[in-house]
């Protein structure tokens, strides 16, 4: 019994296939359908390794994990179909050595078990009963599950992290999740976009300055390193940092000490660095635009965020979330996507990634005329976000769908939707000034007023 692998999962099918795969690998296996039966068995024996699901009827797997850690029994691998940041991080924080996202590849699961059995690493220390916060990161696709797994595993460490990915993929959200799931969560999270600060001011922003250090410096200023003391400093677009400042940053990372600009007082800092870039740092190193030694200091652990087009299955989830969140933020009536509209939205590539999708949903919340967003409502809005500008593709999709369903008055409905979308977009752009909106559209003010009035009458 002492060399057995224990599987605790209420799903009989999962237990069966996983147990068979482990037995084929030459391992002895014992199965349990609930936490209570596994706990009862612990009175007679101890497993060589235990795999447990998270959510089960009665007690969950995390409570069992905590008990095993307290008794020095392990290692433990957690399995779950719920691979959000909070659940993943909670598992690692409680002492799990690995996390398998369901559905998992059986070969990978067997490899994880074999690694855990061979490992002599000490389980992670439990940092108290901390309720994990809700994170803005959303996704159920395989690439995002891997991101959540990495965040959960790395957050509890103090290692520097480099987050890579295209613009708009959510790099700052990952940085915040790393901070909130770490032991530093009670300390400041400070973010600085190094590309947004003029190079001559960036040194002062990072390290602070003394009064009189330069023209306009009338008083002492604490830089971002001091502001983030004990917490996390997020350096966005690190690839754009000037070479001279890269040298100074390297010294700080190596020694944990710095001087304010114009200062003589040596300041020691205790800050975790999380950096991000959309650029290929190795290419910039080869071009002499980025220091290789600084890249290695920052790139201790890398988390690569997938482009939205590579996780298209997440688009409907994200779009509906953004639509609801915008309506709540702006105190507007909630709206919903029709199936056809949601299908069209999920087919786009989004060169601006999640940020572009969020902006699209914000516009739809404001300018779509009805409570249900139809493909016709996407016309002018999608044109503003599409790389090709072919908004007529969305109109064509809507028309084909409407004709297939035998809808009536298709031309009149499409024309009304187009008129209202243009009119409301023009009013939004002109801050509600009708004369300016009419001029921008090339119609008379009376025409604009008449069409708006007709729309309100129809809605009543």
Image: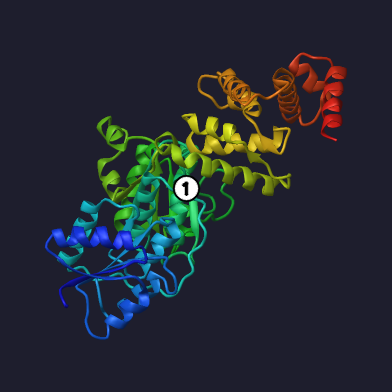
- Residue 172 visible in the displayed image: yes
Where residue 366 sits: x, y (%)? 70, 36
From this view, report whether residue 52 is shown above or below residue 272: below
Describe residue 171's horizontal placement relative to residue 408 as left or right.
left
Q: Secondary structure at mark 1?
A: helix
Residue found at the very far left of the displayed protein: 26
Residue found at the very far front of the displayed protein: 406
From this view, report whether residue 432 is shown above or below residue 264: above
Question: Residue at the location (69% across, 45% down)?
Answer: 334
Q: Tell me the quarter of the image containing the C terminus.
A: top right
Where residue 132 sits: x, y (%)? 48, 65
User: In front: 439, or 387?
Assistant: 387
Q: How many marks?
A: 1
Residue found at the very far bottom of the displayed protein: 43
Q: Which residue is mark 1?
A: 172
Question: Residue at the location (17% across, 66% down)?
Answer: 117
- Residue 205 visible in the displayed image: no
Q: Tell me the quarter of the image containing the N terminus.
A: bottom left
User: In front: 28, or 247?
Assistant: 28
From this view, report whether residue 19 is shown above or below residue 408: below
Q: Colour scheme used in the picture?
A: rainbow
Where residue 119 sits: x, y (%)? 17, 65
Where residue 417 sits: x, y (%)? 72, 25
Question: Residue at the location (17% across, 61% down)?
Answer: 114
Describe residue 125's horizontal placement relative to residue 171 as left or right.
left
Quadrant in which residue 247 is drawn: top left
User: In front: 326, or 276?
Assistant: 326
Quadrant in which residue 54 is drawn: bottom left
Mark 1 nearby-residue class (10 Å; few <14, some 14–19, many ≥20): some
């Amino acid at each position: 019994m002492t060399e057995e692998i224990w599987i605790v999962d209420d799903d009989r099918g999962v237990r069966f296939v996983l147990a068979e795969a482990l037995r084929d690998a030459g391992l002895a296996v014992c199965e349990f359908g609930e936490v209570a039966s596994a706990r009862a068995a612990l009175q007679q024996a101890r497993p060589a390794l235990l795999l447990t699901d998270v959510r089960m009827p009665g007690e969950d797997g995390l409570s069992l994990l905590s008990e095993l850690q307290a008794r020095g029994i392990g290692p433990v691998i957690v399995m779950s179909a719920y691979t959000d940041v909070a659940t993943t991080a909670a598992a690692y924080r409680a002492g799990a050595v690995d996390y398998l996202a369901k559905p998992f590849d059986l070969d990978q699961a067997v490899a994880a078990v074999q690694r855990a059995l061979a490992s002599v690493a000490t389980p992670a220390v439990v940092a108290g009963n901390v309720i994990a916060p809700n994170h803005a990161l959303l996704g159920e696709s395989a690439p995002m599950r891997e991101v959540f797994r990495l965040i959960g595993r790395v957050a509890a460490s103090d290692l520097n992290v480099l987050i890579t990915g295209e613009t708009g993929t959510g790099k700052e959200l990952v940085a915040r999740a790393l901070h909130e799931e770490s032991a530093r969560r009670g300390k400041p999270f400070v973010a600085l976009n190094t590309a947004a600060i003029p190079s001559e001011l960036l040194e002062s922003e990072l390290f602070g300055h003394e009064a009189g250090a330069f023209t306009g410096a009338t008083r002492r200023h604490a830089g971002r390193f001091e502001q983030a003391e004990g917490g996390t400093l997020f350096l966005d677009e690190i690839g754009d940092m000037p070479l001279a400042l890269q040298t100074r940053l390297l010294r700080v990372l190596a020694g944990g000490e710095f001087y304010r600009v114009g200062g003589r007082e040596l300041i020691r800092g205790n800050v975790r660095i999380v950096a991000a870039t959309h650029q290929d740092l190795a290419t910039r190193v080869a071009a002499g635009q980025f220091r290789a030694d600084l890249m290695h200091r920052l790139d201790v652990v890398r988390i690569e965020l997938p482009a939205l087009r590579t996780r298209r299955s997440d688009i409907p989830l994200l779009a509906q979330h953004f639509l609801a969140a915008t309506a709540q933020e702006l105190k507007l009536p909630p709206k919903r996507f029709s199936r056809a509209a949601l299908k069209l939205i999920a087919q786009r590539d989004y060169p601006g990634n999640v940020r572009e999708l969020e902006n699209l949903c914000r516009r739809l919340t404001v300018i779509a005329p009805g409570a249900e967003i139809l493909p016709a409502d996407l016309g002018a809005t999608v044109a503003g976000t599409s790389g090709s500008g072919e908004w007529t593709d969305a109109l064509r999709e809507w028309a084909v769908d409407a004709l297939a369903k035998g809808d009536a008055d298709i031309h009149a409905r499409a024309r009304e939707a187009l008129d209202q979308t243009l009119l409301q977009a023009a009013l939004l752009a002109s801050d509600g000034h009708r004369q300016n909106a009419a001029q921008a559209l090339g119609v008379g003010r009376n025409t604009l007023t008449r069409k708006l009035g007709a729309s309100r009458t129809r809605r009543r």
